[in-house]
Structures are given as structure tokens and as C-alpha cells.
Image (tube, rainbow, N blue to C red):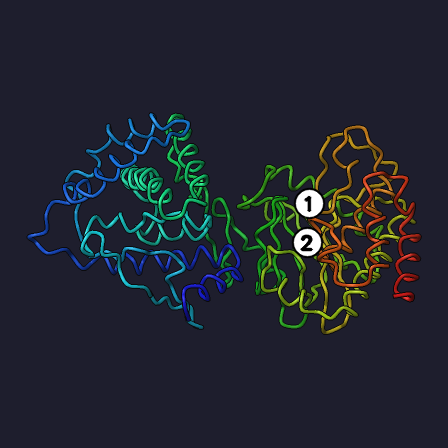
């Protein structure tokens, strides 16, 4: 397996798995650093600045300026002492997940030859110089915590910030001569660093999750902001799956008692990505109970019971072995997107039929997106979930931007005082067609996978002008089926 393949494999991991991989990678790097440098090795501070001072001079002579360049130069000049007396050890030189292989049993193997720049030896923390370049805060956080067996000391961030700032500045001249197309991005990155330094922040903190905790229940890991007692789950059985990536403040569990499986949605815990307080999450979840009862339908996940428990609120649903369409579940999404066009036609029509049912019940769909769409390959059935924000009509937009994914939201869902109704949902359903058969961001014909006639129906549905859309979801379904017959 090469580096590119390793990175592709990581893209299929959940954020919790990425964090745990980072933990292992940090422990492996610490093992590498047990190989100490030769005793006669020249002082690290002198070796480092012998290389970097020359590069800094090259930048200063280049005449290339960016906003805040004086702040960066001043920072580097006044913080040189951070490198004084730094220990030295064997360095890998290019340590990041692209140079890691992960075996089937989750063991990590390091690939790629070490960097020769400093003779393979130097400050052990210099091996973190690519920290955050992948943009993956979960892996990066795990890497640091695995290396230190917990939170790192502040001096680590100070020293690493110095390396990152120096590397960013000195990269400008290299890109000018060797990769000029990347020069604008290098300047933008240096400007961002300058703003962080001016505000007294380390540019590294955007890639480190300080309020982050991994907890296990029945051997299954999941992320939280702080520990929380989920012992009450044993009432329903043993946990076999956790969904911890929601921003709603809910966390969901797959639980089995050995005979039946349940899907338990719980509010009240300090979830990692919550954008509301635990109390607000509980209140929001409680409000959804009558929605699931009112909208009961063969394609909607079935609510079995609900209760106040564990200092929060739980809703217990029937479990479905279905695959979700949303990218937050990469393995599931990959399987979902491998379904045939005929199956996608079935999924789309079942989604429309459910929302026709919802409209007849007097509900408007709010916050419907690809995370609400699942498909059970065993039963050949579409399963819809997460209808928590569906509301009774008439509904007026009272907050401006409503909840939801921008890929599925109509113009009126951004407009304070706008009417949100079935015509709004026609837009959402049209966007769903693009998600299933094309590109839900651009909604262009170039990436449309089926007939031009069907494209015209979907394009009409996502018109920014309400009166140009189909006026009911039933009309959309009729036009879609007619276009399928004529394709």
C-alpha cells in the first residue's frame, strides 16, 4: 500500500476512528524518538538557524510582501530562544498519515525515507512540523495526545508554533521559483498566521480539539466533550454501534438485547459537535415525539417508546440495517452510491410519496437532507429518519436562515418572514433528485446521470422563483413519472 492508498483508506474512517488512529500514530512516533542523537551532534539551535537564517534572508531580499509580514518577522526574531537547549533524537522527517499504512488489524506501519535536511537528527518536536496540514483535527488531536499520553505542555505549542511560522514564511521564496501557482495560497496562509499572532493566538489551535474526549460503552468508542454516564443503556441491551457526529446535541446508539435491535436517540450528553446546550437538545428532542407519531409511515423509522432517563431524554426506535447517504458516514455512503439507477428511482419516488403523506397531514419538511435518507438493501426499502424539525403549517420563517443543508434549501428558507410550505418542499425534493442523479451543489446538466426530460423536471423544482416550480409534491411526482416513461 502506498501513501496515496493510505490516505484514501482514512477518508472512509469515521472521525472517532481517525482520532484513534492519531493516538496510535503518536505512540509510534514517540517510539521512533527513543533513538537518541549522537553525543557529538552540534547544538540544535545552531544547526536549525544555520539553515533557516539563510532562508529568512532570502525572503527578506525577495521583495515579496503580504499583510502582516512585519508581525511574522518580529515574532520570529523575538522568540528564537524557544529553541535553546532543545534535546535531539532520530527524526522521521515527514511524519503524517500519508506515510502511514494501517493493517486489517489496525496496526500502524511507517513508510517513506526520513528527511535528510538535518542529518536525520534534531528536536523531536520538529517531526510535528506538518501538524494540521491535512486539515483533519481529529487525527491531529489524537497524534499529539498519543505522543504525550494526554495533554501536551504549553511549551510544546510554543515551540511548534515557531517551526510552523518559520516554515510558512520561508516557503514563499521556494514556491516563487519552483511552484509559482501555489504562491498566492502561501501568501494567504502567511497572512492568516500574522492575524493569529497579532491576536495572541497560535495558528495551530484550529487543528486541535481541546474539549474532546473518547469514551467506550461495551467496547465501542465514541467522542464527547467530557465523560458521561451511559450505564442506563444496559436496560435495552448491549451497544454495537454509535453515531456521534451530529450537531443537534443528540447522540445515537445501536443496541441489541440478543433478540431485537433498537436505535436509541439521546439528548442530554455533552456531545462533541453540539451547537446547542444539553438542555436545549433535550427540549428539542422532546418536541419531536408527536411528529413521529403523526407522520408514522412505512418509509419512516418507527418510534417504539420514549422516556426521561440518564439525566436526559431518549427516544427508542426500531433498528434498520440501512445505509445512509450522508458523507459523515463514509463507508455507508460508499455502499449507498453503488446502488443501481433503478434502485435510485425507487428511493426518490418513495421519498416523494412520504412527503406527499406529510403534506396531507399538514406538515412541512424542515431540515431534510441526505443525512435523512437511508436504504435497506436486505428489504429493498427506503428508510427516512431525522424528521425532528418538521412542523405544522402554516409556518413562517422567524429566524432567517433555517436549519438544514444549504444544498437542499430553497431561497425562502433564508428569508425572515417568508412562508415555508409545500412549494418550499418541492424545491427540497428537486435538490434531492440532484443528490441522487447529479450534483446537488451545482445542479448542472453536465453531471446529470439520467435523461434530459428528467433533468428538466428537477430543474423546474429547484427554480428560485416559487411560481415556476411545481406547486405540489404530487405534481412533481406525476411529472417525474411521465418523464421516465418518455425517456
Q: Earlier in the sequence, mark 1 or mark 2?
A: 2
- Is 172 left or right of 291, judged from the image as shown? left
The residue mark sitting in front, 1 or 2, is 1
Compare residues 357 and 418 and report the one nearer the observer: 418
Residue 247 figure quarter:
top right
- Give the vertical position of 164 relative to 330 (above or below): above
Residue bearing the label numbered 1 = 405
Q: Is residue 316 at all visible to an observer of this figure?
A: yes
Q: Residue at x 89, y 57 (%)?
A: 477
Q: Can you name the residue that lies furthest to the left here?
A: 40
Q: Which mark is residue 371?
A: 2
Mark 1 crowdedness (10 Å alpha carbons): few <14, some 14-19, many ≥20: few
Q: Is residue 230 left or right of residue 63?
A: right
For the residues bearing labels 1 and 2, Cβ distance under 8 angstroms: yes
Q: Residue 465 location, x and y as percent?
A: 85, 38
Assign the N terminus to one quadrant of the image. bottom left
- Residue 388 in view, yes or no: no
Q: Quadrant of residue 252?
A: bottom right
Write down the quadrant of residue 189 in the picture: top left
For label 2, the SS is helix
In the shown orientation, is residue 412 left or right of residue 19? Answer: right
Foreground of the two, 10 or 169: 169
Tell me how far mark 1 sits from mark 2, CA to CA. 9 Å
The quarter of the picture where the C terminus appears is bottom right
Could you tell me residue 317's position as x and y percent? 71, 58
Amino acid at each position: 500500500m502506498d501513501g496515496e492508498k493510505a490516505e484514501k483508506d482514512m477518508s472512509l474512517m469515521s472521525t472517532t476512528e481517525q482520532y484513534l488512529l492519531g493516538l496510535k500514530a503518536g505512540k509510534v512516533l514517540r517510539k521512533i524518538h527513543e533513538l537518541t542523537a549522537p553525543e557529538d551532534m552540534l547544538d540544535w539551535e545552531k544547526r536549525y538557524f544555520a539553515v533557516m537564517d539563510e532562508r529568512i534572508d532570502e525572503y527578506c531580499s525577495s521583495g515579496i510582501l503580504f499583510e502582516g509580514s512585519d508581525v511574522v518577522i518580529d515574532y520570529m526574531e523575538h522568540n528564537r530562544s524557544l529553541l535553546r537547549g532543545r534535546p535531539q533524537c532520530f527524526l522521521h522527517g515527514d511524519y503524517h498519515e500519508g506515510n502511514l499504512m494501517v493493517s486489517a488489524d489496525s496496526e500502524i506501519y511507517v513508510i517513506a525515507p526520513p528527511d535528510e535536511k538535518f542529518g536525520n537528527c534534531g528536536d523531536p518536536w520538529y517531526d510535528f512540523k506538518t501538524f494540521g496540514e491535512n486539515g483533519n483535527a481529529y487525527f491531529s488531536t489524537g497524534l499529539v495526545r498519543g505522543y504525550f499520553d494526554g495533554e501536551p505542555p504549553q511549551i510544546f505549542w510554543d515551540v511548534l508554533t515557531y517551526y510552523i511560522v518559520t516554515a510558512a514564511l520561508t516557503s514563499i521564496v521556494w514556491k516563487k521559483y519552483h511552484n509559482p501557482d501555489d504562491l498566492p495560497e502561501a501568501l494567504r496562509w502567511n497572512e492568516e498566521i500574522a492575524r493569529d499572532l497579532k491576536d495572541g493566538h497560535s495558528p495551530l489551535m484550529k487543528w486541535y480539539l481541546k474539549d474532546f474526549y473518547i469514551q467506550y460503552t461495551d467496547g465501542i468508542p465514541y467522542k464527547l466533550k467530557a465523560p458521561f454516564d451511559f450505564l442506563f443503556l444496559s436496560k435495552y441491551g448491549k451497544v454495537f454501534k454509535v453515531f456521534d457526529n451530529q450537531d443537534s446535541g443528540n447522540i445515537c446508539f445501536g443496541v441489541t438485547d440478543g433478540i431485537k435491535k433498537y436505535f436509541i436517540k439521546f439528548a442530554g450528553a455533552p456531545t462533541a459537535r453540539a451547537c446547542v446546550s444539553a438542555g436545549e437538545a433535550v427540549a428539542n428532542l422532546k418536541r419531536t415525539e408527536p411528529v413521529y407519531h403523526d407522520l408514522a409511515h412505512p418509509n419512516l423509522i418507527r418510534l417504539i417508546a420514549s422516556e426521561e432517563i440518564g439525566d436526559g431524554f431518549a427516544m427508542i426506535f426500531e433498528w434498520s440495517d440501512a445505509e445512509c447517504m450522508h458523507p459523515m458516514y463514509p463507508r455507508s455512503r460508499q455502499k449507498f452510491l453503488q446502488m443501481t439507477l433503478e434502485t435510485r428511482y425507487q428511493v426518490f419516488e418513495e421519498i416523494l410519496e412520504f412527503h406527499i403523506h406529510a403534506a396531507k397531514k399538514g406538515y412541512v419538511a424542515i431540515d431534510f437532507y441526505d443525512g435523512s435518507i437511508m436504504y435497506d438493501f436486505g428489504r429493498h426499502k427506503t428508510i427516512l429518519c431525522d424528521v425532528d424539525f418538521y412542523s405544522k403549517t402554516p409556518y413562517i420563517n422567524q429566524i432567517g436562515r433555517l436549519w438544514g443543508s444549504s444544498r437542499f434549501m430553497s431561497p425562502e428558507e433564508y428569508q425572515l418572514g417568508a412562508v415555508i410550505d409545500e412549494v418550499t418542499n418541492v424545491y427540497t425534493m428537486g435538490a434531492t433528485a440532484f443528490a441522487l442523479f447529479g450534483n446537488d451543489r451545482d445542479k448542472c446538466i453536465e453531471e446529470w446521470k439520467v435523461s434530459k426530460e428528467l433533468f428538466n423536471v428537477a430543474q423546474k423544482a429547484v427554480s428560485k422563483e416559487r411560481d415556476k416550480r411545481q406547486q405540489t409534491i404530487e405534481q412533481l411526482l406525476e411529472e417525474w413519472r411521465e418523464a421516465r416513461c418518455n425517456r
